[in-house]
Structures are given as C-alpha cells and as structure tokens.
Image (cartoon, coloured by chain):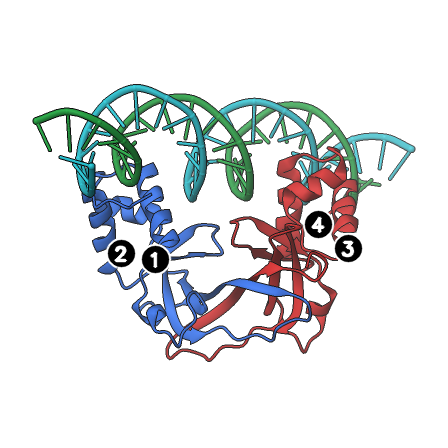
Chain colours: A red, B blue, C green, D cyan
Amino acid sequence: MKRRNTESKELVLSILSNSTKAMSQDAIERKTEGKIDRATIYRILNRFCEDGIAHKVVADDGKRYFAICVKCDDPSNLPNNHFHFRCTECETIECMPEIVKYSQPENYTIKKVNCVLIGVCSECA
Amino acid sequence: MKRRNTESKELVLSILSNSTKAMSQDAIERKTEGKIDRATIYRILNRFCEDGIAHKVVADDGKRYFAICVKCDDPSNLPNNHFHFRCTECETIECMPEIVKYSQPENYTIKKVNCVLIGVCSECA
DNA sequence: TAATAAATGCGACTATGTTGCAATAATTAT
DNA sequence: ATAATTATTGCAACATAGTCGCATTTATTA
C-alpha cells in the first residue's frame, strides 16, 4: 500500500494546511468547489490520519474534524492530547495549546483522548 | 409544557438508573425489547437532559450517550465536567470521577465540556 | 366525566460516513 | 518510451444516527 501523489490529495492537504481551524469533510468539500467527490475526501482524510499527517477529533455535534496541527508535532506534546474548542457562534473547531491532563485510573489502559470544550471564541465574543 | 408521567418515561428512567454505564439510544431500545419507539426514546432522553435529570456525552464514535450520574449531582462537581471513558473492548461508556481541568483561555467563554478518554477498562484488561 | 394538551408511534426525511465496483491514473518494471 | 501493476477515484448504494410532522393516544385538569 505505497501512497501515491495525486491532485486531490495535494488539494486537500493544502486546504487543511492553510486553515487555522480543524475542518470537517463538508467544509473541505465547499473549499474544493466540487472538484473532489465526497467519498474521496473521506478516504484522503482517513489516510492522512493513518499516516500521522493529520489527526481527528469528534466534536459534540457528532462530526469528525481534521487538522494538521503543527503544534502537535512538537515532541513535548503527545499527539492528540490537547484540548479542542468548538465555537457555537462561528461553528469552527480549533486546536488549543493546552494539554489534557488526567490521572491514570487503576487497571485502565488509555490509548486516545477526545476532548472538546464548547463555548464562544474570542473573535465572536 | 408540564411534564407527564408515562410508562415509557418510567421504563427508560429505570433502565438508565440501573445502569452503571452511560447508554446510547440503541442500547436502551434493546433493553426495552421493542416496547418503545426509537423516536420516543430519543425524545424522552432529550427531555431528561433539558430537565437536568440526565446528561449527554458524545463519544468519539459520534454517538450520543446518556447517563444519570449520581456523582454529578454532587454540588462540588460541576455538572458534565467530569471525564468519560469509552472501552473499545466492551463498547461501553462510563462516567469517571475525575473532573476536567483547563485554564480559561483569554476572551473565550466556555459553556460545556465533552471529554472522552478511550482505551480498555479494568474489566476487559 | 369531559376538555386539554403532552406524549406516542409511524413514516418520511436529513446528515454523516462507509463500501463495492468499474474506470482512471500514478508508479514501476521492461 | 511503453507496458504492467495497483493505488486512487467517482459513482451509486448502503448503513446508521438522529429529527420532525402529524394523527392518535393518554395523563392531567377542570
């Protein structure tokens, strides 16, 4: 399963890279102006996650949001371990710098973290 | 909009109350053995949330889970402010005692918290 | 016991996401 | 260059979660 470089992949990558926010499939589709099929966008995004290029958060609206978060690449930040913020005004999701901290419960194995804070962001305040 | 006491409502309430875990609509439906319609279960659960009887978490599988968490009623615990845990083995969600802590970001208003830790619980370990 | 309005069941609908399959196109080998 | 290989794509179909309108039922109240 060696990955190939395709126009669609590059387009999605550049849209995500140029966004300061995490994006859902439909937001990306709007940006591509219908150049890429729905299913293809999902496949590209899921591949990005598999390959560690992007990460995914599920917000409290039940939707998956994807981000290429440069801060996450910092080795001091465990990947995906930061909070996310969903603004109910502008309906965007952003990665927050703050790391999620929790005490390890006895005999539990924690593999992933999916944390979203919900409210109004500074721009919409 | 005065609430009425109905069999369906009592049944859902008792199922939720007797569960140590947060439950999704379909899990509740299985427990009721088809006695209550899908849409009705959703309406009952949403009413419970409106009335502050139950609370809702959206897990990283995109599904809503509902719980009547006695611990949450403790005034020292802000409602909904605790972590949740999703076990990928037994596919259950539980409320954790630990409170979610975060620093207030400048000019942001935080109204809700939706935090899920994902892994394997002690029973499945 | 009758009037009222909340709750229910049913069907239709929306939205998000996945999958199978044939066609396309990026790699790789010749 | 050209052909062979196989990842990727588009399309349609499907799956699942959740909501909504509306006629009917039923809990409350007058």
In the rendered image, which quarter is residue A36 located in? top right
Does dot 4 land on a helix, a strand or a loop? loop
Nearer to the camera, A41 or C2: C2
Residue at 20% from the left image edge and 48% from the top image edge:
B11
CA–CA distance in space, label 1 to label 2: 9 Å
Question: Is label 1 in contact with label 2 (beta carbons under 8 Å)?
Answer: yes
In the rendered image, which quarter is residue A35 located in? top right
Image quadrant in which the N terminus of chain B is located? top left
Going by the numbered disc 4, the residue's amino acid type is Arg
Going by the numbered disc 1, the residue's amino acid type is Ala
Q: Mark 2 sits on what residue? A: B16
CA–CA distance in space, label 4 to label 3: 19 Å
Please check whether the numbered discs 4 and 1 fall on a single chain: no
Subunit bearing disc 3: A
Q: Any mark on residue B29, and which?
A: none
Question: Is label 3 in contact with label 2 (beta carbons under 8 Å)?
Answer: no
Nearer to the camera, B73 or A99: B73
Q: Residues within 10 Å of mark 2 (few under 14, many from 20)?
A: many
Image spot of residue B84 (x, y percent): 42, 66
Q: Mark 1 sits on what residue? A: B54
Does dot 3 land on a helix, a strand or a loop? helix
Residue at 35% from the left image edge and 48% from the top image edge:
B47
Is C7 drawn above or below residue A72 in the view shown? above
Q: Nearer the viewer, mark 3 or mark 1?
A: 1
Q: Nearer the viewer, mark 1 or mark 2?
A: 1
